[in-house]
Image (cartoon, helix red, strand yellow):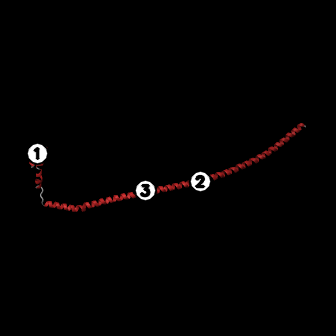
Amino acid sequence: MFATISAAVSRSPAALDAAVLDHAWELPVAAAGLVDIDATAIVQFGFFIALVLVLPKLIFDPLLARLEQRDARTDGARAEAKSLLKEADEQVVVYERAMAQQKQQALAERAVARNAAQREANELIAKVRAETNRKIEAGIAAMRSEADKARGAIEAEAAQIAGMITAKIVEGQV
């Protein structure tokens, strides 16, 4: 069989395919003689059974447990992160509400302070106006009294001058 296939290889690829197909039924029979079942096969089967029994306990089970533990940790961490994010969002909302309340309170206090300052300014302006009006009235009264005194003095002097003019006119006519 192998000689036929070797001869077909030297001729052409098509001849090779034909030779292989012609002798394909002979391959398992020829290969059956290559494997001998003896004590080494039993030892190998024993090693295989031992590995099937031992490897899961030594390697696979701890590895799977470790992977499950890692998955549990990551899932737990994800859940914790989601809860922390939710809590942070709630705290942001609470903070924003508190800030809005504080802002409103500050605006109200500022309005009250502004109104109080405006009242104080109005009172001060009224006091200053009243004081100024008193001073102006006192000044006007003082000026009137001085004007009356000056008028009185001018009238007295005018009467004296008139008397002198009258006396001179009377002297000059007589």
Q: Give how far across and how far down residue 161 sits, in percent.
A: 83, 41
Residue in the foreground of this view, choosing between 134 and 7: 7
Q: Earlier in the sequence, mark 1 or mark 2?
A: 1
Residue in the foreground of this view, choosing between 105 and 149: 105
Q: Give how far across and how far down residue 35 sits, in percent.
A: 12, 56
What is the spatial separation of the Cα atoms under label 1 and label 2, in whole angstroms? 116 Å
Left or right, 145 with respect to 87, comes to right
Q: Give how far across and how far down residue 65 sits, in percent.
A: 29, 61
What is the spatial separation of the Cα atoms under label 1 and label 3, in whole angstroms? 80 Å
Identify residue for label 2.
115
Residue in the foreground of this view, choosing between 117 and 49: 49
Identify residue for label 3.
89
Residue in the foreground of this view, choosing between 58 and 22: 22
- Label 1 CA crowd tier, 10 Å (few <14, some 14–19, many 20+): some
Residue at x 48% of width, y 56% of height: 97
Q: Earlier in the sequence, mark 1 or mark 3?
A: 1
Q: Earlier in the sequence, mark 2 or mark 3?
A: 3
**Which amino acid does the dot numbered 3 rest on?**
Asp
Residue at x 17% of width, y 60% of height: 45
